[in-house]
Amino acid sequence: QVQLVQSGAEVKKPGASVKVSCKASGHTFSGHAIHWVRQAPGQRFEFMGWINTASGDTKYSQKFQGRVTITRDTSATTAYMELSTLQLEDTAVYYCARDCWDGTCYDSWGQGTLVTVSS
Amino acid sequence: DIQMTQSPSSVSASLGDRITITCRASQDINNDFSWYQQKPGKPPTLLIKAASTLQSGVPSRFSGSKSGTEFTLSISSLQPEDFATYFCQQADSFPRTFGGGTKLEIK
């Protein structure tokens, strides 16, 4: 079965960076894009960006442009999301999600990674 | 960005009841719309895609419909496992955006 397994919780200081991994199994890694979204406490989900796992092409939300970098390692079937210059408001649960075949939904999600930014 | 306005933000219902949740998009999004269920401490799961297509494995008591820019999730005959938070998402326009969520609680 399709599985996305993310790295563990992180605590960071303001100004630091965090890198979250998302290891995929149970499907052809290059066959589906991987997206990253986050949910801050009490807030709605927020799209951050996505990666074409075949080509490595990426596209980022304007809100995070310049601060987020999404990469992938096809041999490890793993996608990564790095967010830099962390602020307190970046405290959230970060999820990777597999894009549906038609690019209109997420049919599998990672378990989520809590990133806490605290001084 | 397309705004997704979801209502109600919370609803109380009893086992066996039928409920509906609505999401309204700020502009036409065709059928590039999906519904998700999320339970505390767990990732979301896909319920309905393309506005009205039931995801494989989802019980038939869940259904989705569309009228213009308004999308509706209906759950007939509520079961104990249905009490959760539901949210919507549009994928027609970049960036994808989400509704604010509806918490379904037991009355």
Image (cartoon, coloured by chain):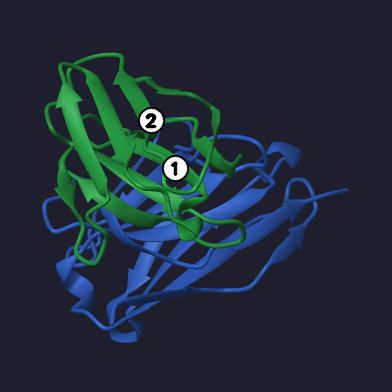
Chain colours: A blue, B green
Query: In the image, A108: left or right of A101?
Result: right
| For discs 2 and 1, the disc positioned in front in the rendered view | 2
Q: Which mark is residue A62?
A: none
Q: Nearer the viewer, residue B3 or B93?
A: B3
| Relative to B11, B55 lies left or right | left
Quick check: A17 above or below B52? below
Between residue A55 and residue A78, name the one nearer to us: A78
x then y, percent, for residue A119: 88, 48
Do the dots labelled 2 and 1 sit on one chain? yes
Q: Is residue A60 left or right of residue A54?
A: right
Which chain contains the residue that carries disc 2?
Answer: B
What label sits on residue B21 in the rendered view? 2
- In the image, residue A68 above or below residue B98: below
Q: Identify the element where label 1 is drawn.
A: strand
For label 1, the residue is B86
Q: Position of residue B92 (x, y in %)?
A: 19, 32
> Which secondary structure, mark 2?
strand
* Of callouts 2 and 1, the N-terminal one: 2
Q: What percent of the width, then of the height, locates residue A110?
A: 45, 67
Which subunit holds the residue at mark 1? B
Category of crowding for the residue at label 2, using alpha-carbon neighbours closer than 10 angstroms: few (below 14), some (14–19), many (at least 20): many
- Going by the image, does B44 lie left or right of A102? right
Dot 2 and dot 1 residues touching (CB under 8 Å):
yes
Residue visible at 49% across and 30% down in the picture: B100
Residue type, numbered disc 2 = Ile
Neighbor class of circle 1 (other Cα within 10 Å; few <14, some 14-19, many 20+) is: many
| Residue at the image position 17 percent from the left and 18 percent from the top | B28
Amino acid under label 1?
A: Tyr
